[in-house]
Amino acid sequence: MPFLLLISLLWLTLPLGSAVAAPSDTMSDGAATVRAASRAVLENRFPAEAYRLDIRVLRTGGSLDSLGTLRLVFPASNTLPRAHTQVDVLAEDPDGIWTKVGWALLYIAHFDSVAVARTGVRKDDPVRVDDLEFAWMETTRFQGDPLRPSDLRALLATGEPYAATPLHAGRALRTTALRTAYAVDTGAAVEMTYERHGLTLRLACKAREPGFNGDVIRLYAPDTQLTYRARLTGLGTALWIETL
């Protein structure tokens, strides 16, 4: 299954000196002209992103019909716009001066290849690649970050993935739906290093909860019958933080 590498880009306005010619007679109305100009901006400035965007002209205002060349001015932003975006439309007068002749309300729809569960998987169970498939879908108002092929590839590079939440067949997945293997699982043996006032001890403990490397979890030591908070430093090792 091929993976897509998505590049995060900033949205910039069409630079001065770059004009877009009106489309042919078959698309000569104002809305079609604006849509074609918007598409040209995307393809010109963001070729790696333009293929997954669809521009819809919702409303227009001003004198946009029968324009020869025009320029679109998008709102200043450091992110690629999505959903509703209003742009100013500029046209060139006989003296070569660009002036605003109207505006347009666009809807910029985002599409992406998103992981979809083929079958149900219980929380904390391993997830096989065959349990997932990718579907091209609109993500303009997707809740959270969709799980893209590049996200899955990065996760697979760290080892076998697990379901961080229950996976339901036919449901599109967020990046938070999968996780890597825990450094320590609940009930696992953990050697905790206790360092205080020049004293170093190592205690055999049991994990009270799962955690990744660097997480702070609770440990219980049968020998002392005490519970501790400790930071995981590796597979089955931790550093004491406090005694509870």
Image (spheres, grey):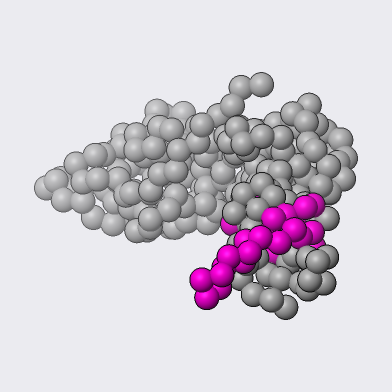
Q: Is residue 168 visible?
A: no
* x then y, percent, for residue 210: 75, 56
The residue sitting at the left extreme is 95
Q: Position of residue 231 (x, y in %)?
A: 62, 62
Instruction: Work out whether residue 134 or residue 153 is closer to the camera in this orientation and state it.
Output: 153
| 131 versus 65 height, above or below | above
Q: Is residue 225 left or right of residue 158?
A: right
Q: Residue at x 79, y 71 (%)?
A: 224
Q: Residue at x 78, y 31 (%)?
A: 128
Q: Which residue is rendered at x = 14% and y = 46% of the image?
A: 96
190 to the left or right of 122 = left
Q: Along the line of sight, which residue is nearer the eye, 61 or 50?
A: 50
Q: Nearer the viewer, residue 104 or 146?
A: 146
Q: Position of residue 44 (x, y in %)?
A: 34, 34
Can residue 180 be seen by looking at this rendering? yes
Which stretch is magenta? 188-217
